Image (cartoon, grey):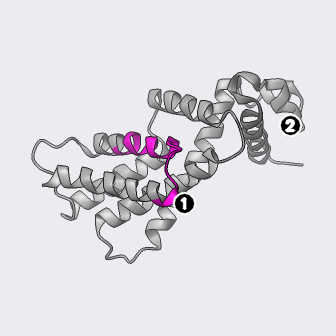
Amino acid sequence: MLSREERRNQILEAAGGQFMAYGFAGASMQGIAKAAGISRASLYTYFGNKMEVFHAVIKLLERFISQQAQRAVDELDPRAPFAARLIATFDTRQTAWLSVTKTQSPYTYELLQLRAESTARFEKTPFEELIVKMIEDATASGEFTPKAGAPPASVIASILVQSTSGIALFDGDGLSEQRQNLRLLIQSFLDGLTG
């Protein structure tokens, strides 16, 4: 017998598959329940509607990406410069999102667009919270000293997250070019804030 949390994760995994297979509009609560091996009535004890399920799937994915990004930073030399740590977090995020966008689902871009629209309306993602903390810590230690009048860490993080998100969606470049573009964008942005 699965615990409630284990069942919830099973539902989210099944829902992710349904969204990738049928898109948001084509996925249904009935299909998600069937894929999860539960009744539709049981599904509604976990989630009130399809949008709630979608948000929960995205939050689970974002939490995983944030944990991977933190792990990437932890693996760096503790004396690594702030820019290198920041780039490592975004590179990890980019690689994770790239693996999602390269799946064979014709709905990937639709789902990423819906994710961007819905997360913009809600709280910061765990990844964005990680970036805010990194900026605040680097500022407190004196390693990152933005010019007078620079926006607060939360705004800097939000701008970085939003501006780097487009790189994963652009199909024209391979992974190495996307990583280079990511590094250039982040370094240029930091230089503009401190220069």
* In this view, 76 is above or below 101: below
Horizontally, residue 105 falls left or right of residue 148, namely right
Q: Residue at x 18, y 50 (%)?
A: 192
Whether residue 146 is visible, yes or no, is yes
Give the position of the C terminus as an image quadrant: bottom left
Q: Which residue is mark 2?
A: 35
Where is residue 3 drawn, in percent x and y? 80, 47
Whether residue 48 is visible, yes or no, is no
Q: Nearer the viewer, residue 151 or 190?
A: 190
Task: Say how many tags the image has.
Answer: 2
Q: Are marks 2 and 1 in contact (CB under 8 Å)?
A: no
Q: Residue at x 50, y 46 (%)?
A: 172
Where is residue 188 drawn, in percent x and y? 25, 53
Q: Residues within 10 Å of mark 1 (few under 14, many from 20)?
A: some
Q: Nearer the viewer, residue 6 or 92?
A: 92
Horizontally, residue 14 falls left or right of residue 81, namely right
Horizontally, residue 61 falls left or right of residue 22, namely left
Q: Which of the 4 image quadrants contains residue 190?
A: bottom left
**Main SS, magenta residues:** helix
Q: Which residue is mark 1?
A: 68
Q: Residue at x 49, y 42 (%)?
A: 170
Q: What's drawn in magenta, residue-wise?
A: 160-176
Q: Identify the secondary structure beneath mark 2.
A: helix
Q: Amino acid at mark 2?
A: Ala
